[in-house]
Image (cartoon, grey):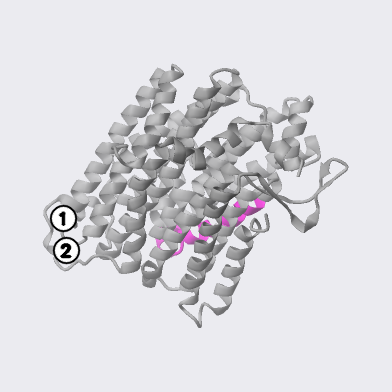
């Protein structure tokens, strides 16, 4: 239990130390951030393997007085553990990659300090047990990401960051309004307490309005259609390790995760809201891939596919919600949610890897237009090979991890008679494959242009995380095996499906 505050405290301390000493000691930023993320990854793996109960940390010792939770609760359950592993492990890979990559920028210490703040914010969102602190940590992560998107200070980066800030500000305003209305209605911001009150009392129409505010606010953070317009510019303009964090981690931690937590464990599940969530997921899945088809900029193509792949996740979650709202087919609801969480985890790995390989290409060629590159597989075999692995994973080609998570979602859709959604998911996967075959062909497998004769493979610290993530794109397919799945994914599914237990586990400790 004492480990829980470290997820926020250690990155915050690291950020402060880096700002104070980073200018004089250039190595301290990369060293300290990597050590912190390695330790937090280790803690998370330990908690997943050894700690089965829900952990609750009451900040300052302030707990429940006269039945009212008056303090700040930090909560780690099985769902939180999955997100914490994604944040800190992909963060570690991106931080390792940054050791060499960031040398081409000035202000290295500011980069690593902002990176630390972004990690602290995302971890804080995931472990927060109350709505207001979710908002506070969300803003820490968002503000750090605004600065990191603009880190190169070129015109396109500043413009992308400004658009991101404006839409992010609108999103935060809707979220804060929703939190305020919840406090006005229930007199508490503790998620478990609100869930208990909603299930035992007359909530009125205000709760439906708050649901709409949260869907729009967190949907914008998750870049779901129709709230997605900021993402392609922001994710393509940021330094590539930050692009990997934004697409692989941030939109999950401060967007999709919060939607799951609130709509399963706080609000009453109802059919109409569940249907809206499913429609948003389906539209994101389809429109994202359609917008990606014509892209020639590698990072913009990857950014649009982030919208599409999050659509798979939200569709799976939405169908699970619909089945629970009808109080039938709970087994298939769990199966659909399992596929969604599996794909959420897989997406962090293969999309993080794709942005790192795109950054490797840009690092050596200073280009992102596929039509101007070509033939790099001869000169950059590690980048080419790992990019191919990630491309096959996102396209759902066996035996890579993306195949199994998509298969679970599609089977769940067929079994629950959502045939059109299942057909759409298959069609989107085929179009995704065509997009990434294009990427591989034009970037790596065309004839080598004379201008790239002297190109070399990226530095060691950029190659190590790419190789590690590529191995995991294959290795995590083992999560389909029941014995392994039950250790990692099934408890997270149960944390959502057993909707009453979150409030009980938090309030009775």
Residue designated by label 1: 375
Residue at horizontal 55 percent and vertical 54 percent from the top: 46
Residue at horizontal 48 percent and vertical 66 percent from the top: 34
Quadrant containing the N terminus in the rendered view: bottom right
Label 1 crowd bin: few (<14), some (14–19), many (20+), radius 10 Å: many
Residue 197 shown left or right of residue 351 in the figure = right
Residue 105 shown left or right of residue 33 in the figure = left
Residue designated by label 2: 452
In the foreground, 305 or 368: 305
Numbered disc 2: secondary structure: helix
Span of residues in magenta: 135-159
Residue 373 in view, yes or no: yes
Residue 495 in which image quadrant:
top right
Up the image or down, 116 lies above or below 247; here it is below
Q: Is residue 147 magenta?
A: yes
Label 2 crowd bin: few (<14), some (14–19), many (20+), radius 10 Å: some
Residue 213 in view, yes or no: no
């Amino acid at each position: 239990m004492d480990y829980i505050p470290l997820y926020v405290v250690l990155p915050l301390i690291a950020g402060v130390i880096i700002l104070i000493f980073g200018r004089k000691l250039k190595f301290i930023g990369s060293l300290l951030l990597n050590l912190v993320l390695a330790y937090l990854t280790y803690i998370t793996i330990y908690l997943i393997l050894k700690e089965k109960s829900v952990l609750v940390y009451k900040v300052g010792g302030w707990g429940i007085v006269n039945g009212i939770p008056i303090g700040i609760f930090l909560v780690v359950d099985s769902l939180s553990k999955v997100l914490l592993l994604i944040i800190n492990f992909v963060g570690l890979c991106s931080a390792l990659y940054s050791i060499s990559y960031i040398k081409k920028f000035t202000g290295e210490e500011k980069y690593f300090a902002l990176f630390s703040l972004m990690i602290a914010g995302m971890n804080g969102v995931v472990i927060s047990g109350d709505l207001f602190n979710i908002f506070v940590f969300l803003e820490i992560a968002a503000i750090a990401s605004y600065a990191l998107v603009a880190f190169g200070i070129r015109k396109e980066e500043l413009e992308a960051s400004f658009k991101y800030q404006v839409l992010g500000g609108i999103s935060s305003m809707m979220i804060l309004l929703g939190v305020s209305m919840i406090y006005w209605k229930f007199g508490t911001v503790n998620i478990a307490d609100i869930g208990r009150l909603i299930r035992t009392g007359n909530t009125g129409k205000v709760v439906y309005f708050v649901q709409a505010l949260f869907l729009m606010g967190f949907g914008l953070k998750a870049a779901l259609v129709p709230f997605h317009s900021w993402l392609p510019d922001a994710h393509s303009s940021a330094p590539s390790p930050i692009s990997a964090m934004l697409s692989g981690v941030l939109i999950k931690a401060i967007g999709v995760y919060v939607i799951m937590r609130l709509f399963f464990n706080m609000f009453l599940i109802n059919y109409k809201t569940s249907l809206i969530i499913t429609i948003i997921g389906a539209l994101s899945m389809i429109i994202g891939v359609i917008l990606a088809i014509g892209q020639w900029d590698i990072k913009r193509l990857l950014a649009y596919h982030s919208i599409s792949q999050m659509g798979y996740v939200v569709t799976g979650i939405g169908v699970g919600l619909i089945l629970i709202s009808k109080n039938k087919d709970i087994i298939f609801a769990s199966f659909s949610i399992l596929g969604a969480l599996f794909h959420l985890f897989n997406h962090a790995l293969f999309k993080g890897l794709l942005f790192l390989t795109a950054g490797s290409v840009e690092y050596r060629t200073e280009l992102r237009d596929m039509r101007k590159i070509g033939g790099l597989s001869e000169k950059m075999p590690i980048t080419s090979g790992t990019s191919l692995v990630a491309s096959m994973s996102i396209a759902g080609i066996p035996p890579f991890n993306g195949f199994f998570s998509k298969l679970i979602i599609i089977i769940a859709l067929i079994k629950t008679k959502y045939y059109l959604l299942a057909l759409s998911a298959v069609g989107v996967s085929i179009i995704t494959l065509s997009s990434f075959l294009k990427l591989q062909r034009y970037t790596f497998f065309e004839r080598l242009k004379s201008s790239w004769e002297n190109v070399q493979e990226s530095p060691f610290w950029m190659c190590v995380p790419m190789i590690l993530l590529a191995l995991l794109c294959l290795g995590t397919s083992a999560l389909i095996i029941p014995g392994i799945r039950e250790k990692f994914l099934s408890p997270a599914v149960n944390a959502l499906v057993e909707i009453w237990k979150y409030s009980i586990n938090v309030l009775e400790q």
